[in-house]
């Protein structure tokens, strides 16, 4: 049963009230070590929650995957972040739930993406929800992320990954910046894309 | 200047059972697509996706699932379509839902990836990632139910959104 998209698809009609908005997108034209969304305090009276959508890859060698990390307000104090992750490794049957805090050198690991070990064009992706970043409480977030690299001889568990993770930044300050970085490589590579969205409390 | 997005592109309620549903002529206006499916089926039916009419072995996927008693993970590569459900498949009687995020669908510099979350109260819940090994922008999406051998039931809904 086919359905050709008609009027709404081309007219650009937005969701009622514009309650979900694109704030900014960064698409890398070359390698870049990290991506920072800054001056987020400008939106404290506009949005209740934030969302980051990304499709990314790093220049890490040897391994098909690399960890993505997230830091708030340039806070790299060790012990200020906690996280849990459910991680599936596909046919290898690997699945784990990290049950203790996972503060990675003063940041939080939020999900894995692909590297230059994979063939050209293979990227990992994720959707990060950041809840109540402007309220007087610790900031919580979650990420659904995954990738599939099927053409590498690297150990199978690192070539495929689906992850659900939750994170906590133990600081009640309003979020003013968010920095995304990678754990193993030096840079995110060309064509990696990071988009920030705001969700209003009401229309 | 922030831009309102999450734009409704199509909203379909089936008037009769269908073994597949295809969205065609998708414009390259947006960055991501979000497809929300809700309904029942005529049997235990997984939803499988194909893009741009590609029926070749260009799809790979990985899932992490819970069936109420255990968690598991499974994946495949080099197959002719990509499942968006595994244990959260569509069934008769109880309703299922699936949210499928198709990332960078209009980009021409990377393979296409989708992330999905699927749920059914009787069978289980899934998180999945899949890849279509093609850098072309997506202009059509075909949802096939249990490889076409089963149908999704009348009253089931399909909502497609574009995100800038």
Image (cartoon, coloured by chain):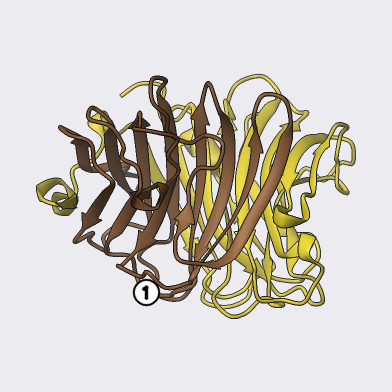
Tell me what hue chain A is rendered in.
Answer: yellow
- What chain is the brown one? B
Judge whether A16 appears above or below B62 on screen. Answer: above
Judge whether A84 appears above or below A162 on screen. Answer: above
Please provide percent x and percent y for residue B64. Answer: 65, 43
Q: Residues within 10 Å of mark 1 (few under 14, many from 20)?
A: some
Judge whether A182 appears above or below A95 on screen. Answer: below
Residue drawn at point x = 70 percent, y = 47 percent: A70
Q: Is residue A79 left or right of residue A81?
A: right
| Circle 1: element type | loop
Please provide percent x and percent y for residue B38. Answer: 35, 31
Residue drawn at point x = 69 percent, y = 55 percent: A161
Q: Quadrant of residue A60?
A: bottom right
Q: Quadrant of residue A40?
A: top right
Q: Residue furthest left?
A: A7
Comparing A29 with B8, the one in front is B8
Please provide percent x and percent y for residue A3. Answer: 16, 50
User: Which quarter of the rendered picture does the C terminus of chain A lie within?
Assistant: top left
- The number of callouts visible is 1
**Chain of the residue under label 1:** B
Comparing A58 with A75, the one in front is A58
Please provide percent x and percent y for residue A106. Answer: 85, 45
Q: Quadrant of residue A21?
A: top left
Residue carrying label 1: B136
Q: Is residue A150 left or right of residue A4?
A: right
Could one spot residue B164 in this view of the protein? no
Residue drawn at point x = 15 percent, y = 32 percent: B15
Could one spot residue A184 in this view of the protein? yes
Comparing B133 with A117, the one in front is B133
Residue drawn at point x = 57 percent, y = 25 percent: A132
């Amino acid at each position: 049963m086919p359905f050709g998209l008609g009027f709404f698809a081309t007219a650009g009609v937005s969701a009622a009230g514009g309650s979900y908005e694109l704030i900014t997108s960064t698409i890398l034209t070359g390698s870049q070590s990290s991506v920072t969304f800054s001056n987020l305090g400008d939106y404290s009276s506009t949005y209740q929650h934030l969302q980051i959508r990304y499709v990314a890859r790093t220049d890490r060698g040897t391994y098909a995957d690399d960890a993505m990390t997230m830091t708030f307000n340039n806070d790299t104090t060790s012990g200020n972040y906690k996280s849990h992750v459910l991680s599936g490794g596909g046919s290898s049957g690997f699945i784990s739930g990290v049950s203790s805090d996972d503060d990675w050198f003063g940041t939080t690991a939020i999900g894995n993406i692909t590297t230059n070990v994979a063939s050209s064009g293979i990227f990992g992706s994720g959707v990060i929800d950041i809840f109540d970043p402007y309220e007087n409480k610790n900031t919580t977030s979650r990420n659904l992320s995954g990738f599939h690299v099927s053409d590498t001889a690297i150990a199978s568990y690192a070539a495929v990954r689906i992850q659900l993770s939750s994170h906590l930044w133990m600081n009640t300050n309003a979020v003013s910046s968010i920095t995304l970085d990678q754990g193993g490589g030096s840079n995110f590579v060309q064509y990696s894309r990071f988009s920030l969205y705001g969700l209003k409390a009401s229309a | 200047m922030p831009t309102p997005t999450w734009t409704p592109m199509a909203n379909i309620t089936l008037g009769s059972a269908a073994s597949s549903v295809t969205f065609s002529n998708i414009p390259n206006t947006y960055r991501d697509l979000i497809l929300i499916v809700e309904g029942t089926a005529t049997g235990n039916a997984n939803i499988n996706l194909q893009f741009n009419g590609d029926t070749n072995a260009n799809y790979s996927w990985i899932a992490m699932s819970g069936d109420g008693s255990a968690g598991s993970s499974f994946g495949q590569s080099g197959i002719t379509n990509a499942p968006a459900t595994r244990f959260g498949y569509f069934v008769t009687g109880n309703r299922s839902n699936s949210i499928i995020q198709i990332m960078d669908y209009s980009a021409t510099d990377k393979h296409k990836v989708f992330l999905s979350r699927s749920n059914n109260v009787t069978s289980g819940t899934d998180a999945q990632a899949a890849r279509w090994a093609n850098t072309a922008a997506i202009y059509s999406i075909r949802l096939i139910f249990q490889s076409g051998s089963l149908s999704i039931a009348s009253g089931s809904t399909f909502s497609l959104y574009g995100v800038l």
